[in-house]
C-alpha cells in the first residue's frame, strides 16, 4: 500500500489559472513532509518542509499547507516557468533518515 | 542548503561492463548520503543508505553485490553498478541530509545500458 499518494497525476493550466496539488499520506508519526520540484533530467529541488498540522509556508507563487492526513501545494497565478513535476515526500523516523516519495504531479502551464 | 554534485551526468555502456557514479557534497561534511533510483514517470525509490566509514545499508530487493557503495570520506560516496544490464538503465540520484531536516539532491546520472 502506497504511503504517499499524489493527485492529480498530471495537470494542465492556463497561465494565471490558480490550482492546488494534493499529497495524502498514511504514515504514523510524521517527522516531516517535504515538497520538491523536479525538472526533466534533473535532480529534485527543495521547496518546503512542513512538520505539524496547520503549518503553512510560502515561496513566490507557491504555498504549502499541512493537515493530519494531507498536504496541499497551492499555485497562484502560475507562469509557464512553473511547469515541472512536483514531488511530495515524508520522513517517518527521526534523524538523518531517507524520504518516502509519492509519484509526483506533472504540471504544465500554457501561455 | 547543501550543494551536491554527481559525475558523470550521463553514461552509456555495453551490457556486462561496470559503471562508477560519484556523489560529492561540496559544502557540507556528510556522514550519511542516500542513493535513489528513478525510472521514467516513476517516483524516486531508495536503494541504499551510504555511511561514511562503514558498510552501506541496502533496501529490500536491492542486490548489494551488484550495486557497490563506498563512502570513503565525508564528502564523497560512490555507487558502482557491476555487470550492468539493460534493466539497470535508470536515473540515479544521490542526496545529502542536514541534521535530520531537509535533504538536498544531486543533479542525477542517466545510465543507459545497451
Image (cartoon, coloured by chain):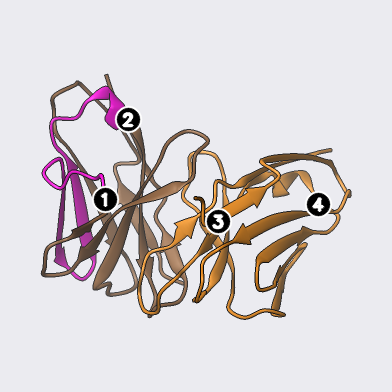
Residue that carries the numbered disc 3 in the rendered image: A4
Same chain for mark 3 and mark 4? The answer is yes
Q: Is residue B36 left or right of residue A91?
A: left
Same chain for mark 3 and mark 1? The answer is no
Q: Residues within 10 Å of mark 4 (few under 14, many from 20)?
A: many
Tell me: residue B102, above or below residue A4: below
Tag 4–tag 2 contact (CB < 8 Å): no
Residue that carries the numbered disc 2 in the rendered image: B89
Tell me: residue B60, above or below residue B41: below
The image shows residue A60 at horizontal and vertical percentages of 75, 66
Q: Write down the region rendered in magenta.
A: B61-88
Compare residues B37 and A66 and report the one nearer the observer. A66
- Where does the C terminus of chain A fall, quadrant-wise? top right
Q: Would you say residue B49 sits in the magenta stretch?
A: no
Which disc number belongs to residue B60? 1
Q: Residue furthest front?
A: A1
Mark found first going from the N terminus, 3 or 4: 3
Compare residues B109 and A105 and report the one nearer the observer. A105
Can you tell which chain is drawn brown?
A: B
Q: Residue at x 42, y 36 (%)?
A: B39
Nearer to us of marks 1 and 4 is 1
Q: Residues within 10 Å of mark 2 (few under 14, many from 20)?
A: some
In three-dimensional space, the C-alpha distance between marks 3 and 2, rounded to whole angstroms, equals 25 Å
Nearer to us of marks 3 and 2 is 3
Can you tell which chain is drawn orange?
A: A
Amino acid at each position: 500500500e502506497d504511503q504517499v499518494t499524489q493527485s492529480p497525476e498530471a495537470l494542465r493550466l492556463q497561465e494565471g489559472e490558480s490550482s492546488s496539488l494534493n499529497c495524502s499520506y498514511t504514515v504514523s508519526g510524521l517527522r516531516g513532509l517535504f515538497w520538491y520540484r523536479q525538472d526533466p533530467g534533473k535532480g529534485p529541488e527543495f521547496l518546503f518542509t512542513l512538520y505539524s498540522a496547520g503549518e503553512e509556508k510560502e515561496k513566490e507563487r507557491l504555498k504549502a499547507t499541512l493537515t493530519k492526513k494531507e498536504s496541499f501545494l497551492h499555485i497562484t497565478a502560475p507562469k509557464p516557468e512553473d511547469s515541472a513535476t512536483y514531488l511530495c515526500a515524508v520522513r517517518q523516523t527521526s534523524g538523518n533518515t531517507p524520504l518516502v516519495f509519492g509519484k509526483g504531479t506533472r504540471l504544465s502551464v500554457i501561455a | 542548503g547543501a550543494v551536491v554534485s554527481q559525475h558523470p551526468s550521463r553514461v552509456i555502456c555495453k551490457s556486462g561492463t561496470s559503471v562508477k557514479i560519484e556523489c560529492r557534497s561540496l559544502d557540507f561534511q556528510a556522514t550519511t548520503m542516500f542513493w535513489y533510483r528513478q525510472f521514467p514517470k516513476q517516483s524516486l525509490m531508495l536503494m541504499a543508505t551510504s555511511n561514511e566509514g562503514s558498510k552501506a545499508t541496502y533496501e529490500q530487493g536491492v542486490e548489494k553485490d551488484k550495486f557497490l557503495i563506498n563512502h570513503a570520506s565525508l564528502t564523497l560516496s560512490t555507487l558502482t553498478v557491476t555487470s550492468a544490464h539493460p534493466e539497470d538503465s535508470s536515473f540515479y540520484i544521490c542526496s545529502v541530509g542536514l541534521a535530520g531536516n531537509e535533504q538536498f539532491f544531486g543533479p542525477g546520472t542517466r545510465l543507459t545500458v545497451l
